[in-house]
Amino acid sequence: MDTQPIGSHFIGGLYVEDRAGELIEVVYPATGKVIARLHSATPSIISRALESAKSAQKIWAAMTGTQRGRVLRRAADIIRDRNHELSVLETYDTGKPYQETSVADATSGADSLEYFGGLAGSITGEHIQYGEDFIYTVREPLGVCVGIGAWNYPTQIACWKGAPALACGNSMVFKPSETTPLSALKVAEILMEAGAPAGLYNVIQGYGDVGAALVGDPRVDKVSLTGSVPTGRKVYAAAADGMKHVTLELGGKSPIIIFDDADIEAAVSGAILGNFYSSGQVCSNGTRVFVHKDIKQAFLKRLTERVSKAVIGDPMDPDTSFGPMVSKTQRDIVLGYIDQGVKEGATLVTGGKVIEGDGFFIQPTVFADVTDDMVIAREEIFGPVMAVLDFEDEGDVLARANDTEFGLAAGVFTQDLTRAHRVVARFEAGTCYINTYNDAPVEAPFGGTKMSGVGRENSKDALNHYSQSKSVYVRMSDLEAPF
Ligand code: NDP
């Protein structure tokens, strides 16, 4: 597959290049080879993208919701038709196994375009009767939205931000992570093919400085970031200066609590899905696995057996179920945490080593006997490192589960449904799971509390974050004034 795009950016419906921008080398994480060379956006590229988005937004907002929805749904169909090609590209971009990308990346982007395409014609205000008078409200688009993405789900993030924004009548300038810049270009290309006006969805490449330039630009009305807490803080502060609307999907250190009555096989599945999918590079991962002491040995035994069955290797091989880390940098960060876990006295149950070769592979790693104060139990690692902690008492484990600055997700495994709901009610997290982990269908709101973010993606909730209410008071009776 030719992974070199014909231009670094997609603006006004066309691929655009400006070689004056800083070089971005795209590396295939499985081999360490450069597979494409792009350039970061220069100030003139940034300006072109914003101007393009500004004019397209006016044309788009003048269309009916149903017309807009039709374009989004057509784009969803094109993505599904081209799923194989897009999944191969996503695998090159991220290193994630094709076994995953073919079912979880372009397809979840298509779900989002289909879902918000379906809702676009139903975005309505309300009528409020006020005596003889009445008020009606209109949900208006915000204008030009900026999306800034992390590198773990490039296609999905481009769609999760684009689909609700476009459904509401906004336009978008999207900046992918420079680590994974390829897939969002395809989303822009497909939206054009589906009938979106030129300039409605633009993609520009760049490092953090390009993101910062977008966030600070007065032509921008809304910013939606998926990234780390430190970046979220900077983006939130910069957006506040221009009083811009903001959605922040940030990091986590989420808990999974496994009670002694849990179905062990299901709990092990949940822990695997919540730690090793995408080689652990998932924001909502349940990386603190609290296991009741009475089932600890049985849980660890079964977990170790199943982790040994991971097929690690060529991500393009459909049998491979565990790929490399996205970059050498990320691999080295994760190895640093593994060293720290060993030094702090956690028990290394399995994994912990680099897999020799040119790619950025690390073994899926499980630590047991982890305590709450260890760094591996407190900081987001964003790699395949599971920390297993012991507990005995429900109230105690809940307090420990909530004792974190993050609040993205949380899960509980138990056969006692009363207990499950009681525990979930006390979780300080935006996205909770009972007897499952990490399902994220577009129909459900997704997002975090505390330092894990602001606002929600997906579901009808997202529409409120990409539109605002205008209220119109209509007087039917005589109007009086004091003089
Ligand atoms: P970063 O925060 O490093 O970067 C996120 C994006 O922001 C990148 O495109 C980055 O560009 C850009 N950026 C960096 N600095 C600025 C700035 N000052 N202003 C505007 N944009 C900026 O995150 P990663 O890419 O390393 O992704 C990993 C993080 O993302 C983890 O913490 C993870 O938890 C979180 N995440 C959250 C999700 C959620 O939905 N809650 C989902 C997926 C990931 P550049 O890459 O060039 O620095």
Image (cartoon, rainbow, N blue to C red):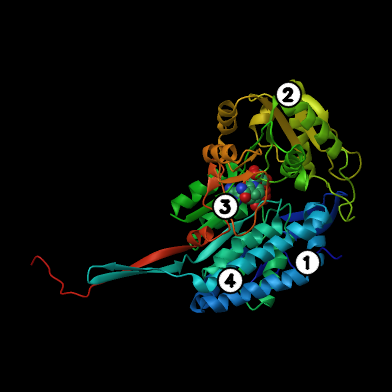
Q: Earlier in the sequence, mark 4 or mark 2?
A: 4
Indicate which disc residue 212 carries. Answer: 3
Which structural element holds mark 2? loop
Residue 428, given in percent of the width and then of the height, sits at 53, 39
Find out if the beta carbon at label 3 lies less than 8 Å from the nearest ligand 1 atom: yes
Disc 2 from disc 3: Cα separation: 42 Å
Where 341 falls versus 84 (above or below)? above
Where 346 falls versus 139 (above or below)? above
Disc 3 from disc 4: Cα separation: 33 Å
Q: Is residue 338 left or right of residue 202?
A: right
Residue 44, given in percent of the width and then of the height, sits at 60, 64
What's the amino acid at mark 3? Ala
Q: In the image, which is nearer the foreground, mark 1 or mark 2?
A: 2
Q: Residue at x 69, y 60 (%)?
A: 108
Indicate which disc residue 50 carries. Answer: none
Along the viewing direction, whichever of 74 and 198 lies nearer the viewer:
74
Q: Which residue is mark 1?
A: 83
Disc 1 from disc 2: Cα separation: 42 Å
Along the viewing direction, whichever of 446 and 436 lies nearer the viewer:
436
Q: Earlier in the sequence, mark 3 or mark 4?
A: 4
Q: Earlier in the sequence, mark 1 or mark 2?
A: 1
What's the amino acid at mark 1? Asn
Asked whether residue 203 appears in the rendered view, the answer is no
Residue 186 appears in which quarter of the rendering? bottom right
Crowd band around label 3 with a 10 angstrom C-alpha radius: few (<14), some (14–19), many (20+): some
Disc 1 from disc 4: Cα separation: 21 Å
